[in-house]
Image: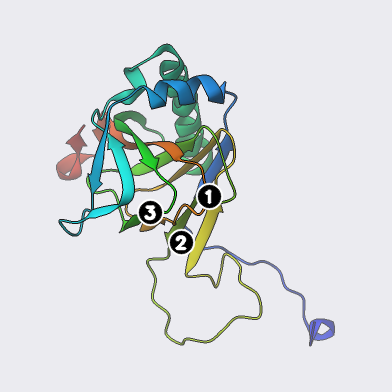
Amino acid sequence: HLGLNLMKLDQVLPLFAEPIALFTLKMDSQDVLKEIKSLKFIPRVSDYSNAHDKYNYGSESFDILSKGPHLKCLEAAITNACEHFIKEIGEYKTDFRITNSWATKVKPGGYAARHYHANSWFSGVYYPVGDPAFAIRFHSPRKLAYDFQPLKFNVFNSMAWTCTAKDNLLILFNSLLDHEVLTNQSKSTRYSIAFNVLPKGTIGKGDGHVKF
């Protein structure tokens, strides 16, 4: 509040911001969860070592959005959200496709190490059922020139941001953004669906164009 009588703040620009969009989908989450539980799961292997992430399992299939009627309905809802993310939030004019999709199962005490999704444009995670102990943390790619504690953490000064799962929550984010699944401190198993998205069609022009 100091000096506000001597100046007028016109605007704060969140330049070069990396959007993370949170949607609440209108799905029957229990029916979706039932189809997820029917999938075959195997232990997940960390992208950065040959060790297993603790109590973390992934579906054997990487095309799970075609594995049941409720999952197919979920795919339609996810597609609508992706279209909004691209055209309304990002304001891009391009078609897209979901390249792969898989389910994850994290038992109590389990977690997934910090990682990103290579060979992708943006990614998403869907939680049919939420819990205060089901959380994902995103990490900033920028580096701090000076390390000191802010008076209050916000979207401008935070180096990490945690999102807690609620029922039917869908999160969309840049695939190259580092993220991790925090330790499941509940007594329930955490189920989710993850997927990756790429552009579709001709991108760019002249000697810089490429077809997906």
Mark 1 neighbour class, 10 Å CA radius: few under 14, some 14 to 19, many 20 or more: some
Q: Which mark is residue 16?
A: 2
Image vertical order of residue 158 relative to residue 25, above or below: below
The type of residue carrying mark 2 is: Phe
Q: Report x, y in % for residue 199.
A: 30, 34
Of residues 111 and 136, which is closer to you in this image? 111
Image vertical order of residue 10 relative to residue 148, above or below: above
- In the image as oriented, which residue stretches furthest toward the top? 69
Distance between the alpha carbons at the discs numbered 3 and 1: 12 Å
Q: Which mark is residue 186?
A: 1
Task: Tell me which label, 3 or 1, sits earlier in the chain.
Answer: 3
Q: Mark 2 or mark 1, which is nearer to you? A: 1
Residue occupied by mark 3: 111
Distance between the alpha carbons at the discs numbered 3 and 2: 30 Å
Mark 2 neighbour class, 10 Å CA radius: few under 14, some 14 to 19, many 20 or more: few
Q: Report x, y in % for residue 141.
A: 37, 66
